[in-house]
Image (spheres, rainbow, N blue to C red):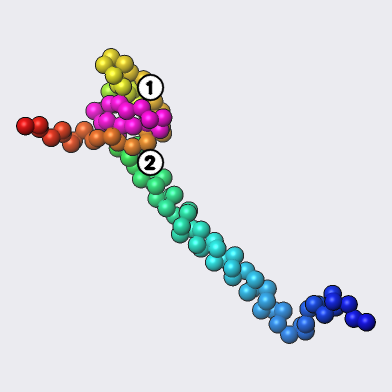
Amino acid sequence: MFDIAYAMGAGGAGGEGAGGFTGFIPLILMFVIFYFLLIRPQQKRTKEHRQMVSNLKKGDRIVTSGGIHGRITGMDESTLTVEIADKVRVKVARGNVSNLAQPAAQSQPDKK
């Protein structure tokens, strides 16, 4: 008698040459999808953050990655001195600045 394992065996050797490449098409397609949905947007955000950190200047209001709001009062090549309250200053690494709270060029609207 024939066993079920023999019935499910590979058929002929007619299409094995093209079968190797077609097996990689789903993997290539998944990589392309991951690139456009995950990798590329993350690289864009990283580039924008790097540019924002390099353009910081005294007087800018920032928010650190820890959530501390403050105003830049001093700068070094790798650290910033941030005033978080009257006469309270802390040193923060440049990379820990998450975003600008309010650029120094913008002014508060006058209240009437």
The magenta stretch spans residue 61: yes
- Residue depicted at x 78% and y 82%: 11
Report if residue 74 is visible in the image: no
| Residue type beneath disc 2 | Arg
Q: Which residue is mark 1?
A: 91
User: Position of 63 compared to 42: left or right?
Assistant: left
On-image quarter of the C terminus = top left
On-image quarter of the N terminus = bottom right
Residue 53, how many percent across, how many down? 35, 37
Q: In front: 112, or 102?
A: 112
- Residue depicted at x 59% and y 70%: 25
Q: Which residue is mark 2?
A: 50
Report if residue 93 is visible in the image: yes
Q: Among all residues in the image, which is located at the extreme right?
A: 1
Residue 99, how many percent across, how many down? 33, 37
Quarter of the view holding residue 92: top left
28 in relation to 91, above or below: below
User: Position of 35 compared to 110: left or right?
Assistant: right
Quarter of the view holding residue 9: bottom right
Q: Crowding at label 2, few (<14), some or many (≥20) Cα neighbours within 10 Å? A: few
- For the record, the magenta segment spans 56-71
Q: Crowding at label 1, few (<14), some or many (≥20) Cα neighbours within 10 Å? A: some
The magenta stretch spans residue 111: no
| Residue type beneath disc 1 | Lys
Identify the element where label 1 is drawn.
strand
Identify the element where label 2 is drawn.
helix
